[in-house]
Image: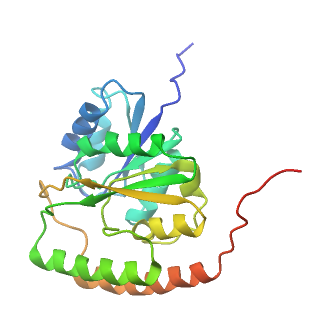
């Protein structure tokens, strides 16, 4: 009989779309960052049009912790993140962007901070320092983060940072919608959980191009922002549940 793999302590979830030039190197970096730990990595191919999927499948022979989950149709980053977290087997998940700009070396420290916290702490997110983006992208992000933080009071300075450590069960309790990945801290707080943040490294994109534009991101963010504000007004927290 085939040996049954032990349940990992951490699942690293990476959504990828047309990232054939970045995904294999990123997977190897994740393996190096978590060497000696009981982990798995779940790459979610969001119906890439290039060789991303084939390269990752071939890499499984080299990296036994690697799993590849594939969408039949392109569904966006938030859906790919959710697909990966649903497929994950560990109680703690770490998400990273598939373009390689998040540094996998930061992931273990976020995991350790989450594990060392109280049960109510369900998210430790990264805050990018010395961002390696264009001045226009940084400008748009600064404005967007300021408006969102003021209106949602989510305490997050950099909601667009893709590297986050979360408790899987808490994430799966959140209401799902497209672009949820930018509002996870606010939704965690809505459920009565605690969130925290740590500075993380940020790197230039290796190959390929960004899948977002400033105008496209702004249009989506405005409607999502109003939706999350509505959700905040419609949530009531029981402050604990006991069987009596």
The one nearer the camera, 186 or 222, is 186
Q: Is residue 160 left or right of residue 183?
A: left
Report the residue at 46% width, 72% height from top: 178
Q: Is residue 42 visible?
A: no
Report the residue at 40% width, 44% height from top: 113
Q: Is residue 40 above or below residue 167?
A: above
Q: Is residue 72 left or right of residue 199?
A: right
The one nearer the camera, 104 or 13, is 104
Q: Is residue 28 above or below residue 193?
A: above
Q: Is residue 84 left or right of residue 216?
A: right
Report the residue at 31% width, 84% height from top: 218
Q: Position of residue 130 (x, y in %)?
A: 13, 61
* Farthest residue, direction right: 244
Q: Is residue 179 visible?
A: yes
Q: Is residue 121 left or right of residue 23?
A: right
Asked which quadrant contains residue 210, the reply is bottom left
Q: Quadrant of the N terminus?
A: top right
């Amino acid at each position: 009989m085939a040996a049954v793999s032990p349940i990992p302590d951490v699942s690293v979830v990476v959504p990828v779309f047309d990232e054939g030039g970045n995904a294999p190197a990123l997977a190897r970096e994740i393996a190096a960052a978590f060497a000696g730990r009981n982990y798995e990595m779940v790459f979610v191919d969001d119906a890439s049009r290039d060789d991303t999927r084939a390269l990752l499948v071939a890499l499984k022979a080299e990296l036994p912790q690697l799993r590849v989950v594939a969408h039949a149709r392109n569904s966006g980053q938030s859906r790919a993140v959710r697909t990966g977290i649903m497929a994950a087997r560990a109680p703690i998940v770490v998400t990273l962007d598939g373009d390689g700009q998040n540094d996998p070396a930061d992931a273990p420290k976020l995991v350790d901070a989450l594990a060392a916290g109280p049960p109510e702490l369900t998210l430790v997110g990264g805050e990018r320092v010395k961002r390696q983006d264009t001045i226009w992208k940084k400008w748009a992000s600064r404005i967007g983060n300021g408006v969102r933080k003021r209106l949602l009071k989510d305490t997050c300075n950099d909601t667009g940072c893709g590297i986050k450590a979360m408790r899987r069960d808490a994430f799966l309790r959140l209401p799902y919608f497209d672009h949820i990945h930018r509002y996870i801290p606010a939704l965690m707080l809505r459920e009565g959980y605690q969130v925290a943040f740590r500075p993380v490294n940020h790197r230039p994109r290796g190959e390929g191009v960004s899948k977002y534009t400033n105008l496209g991101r702004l249009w989506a963010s405005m409607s999502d922002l109003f939706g999350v504000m509505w959700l905040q007004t419609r949530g009531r927290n029981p402050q604990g549940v006991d069987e009596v």
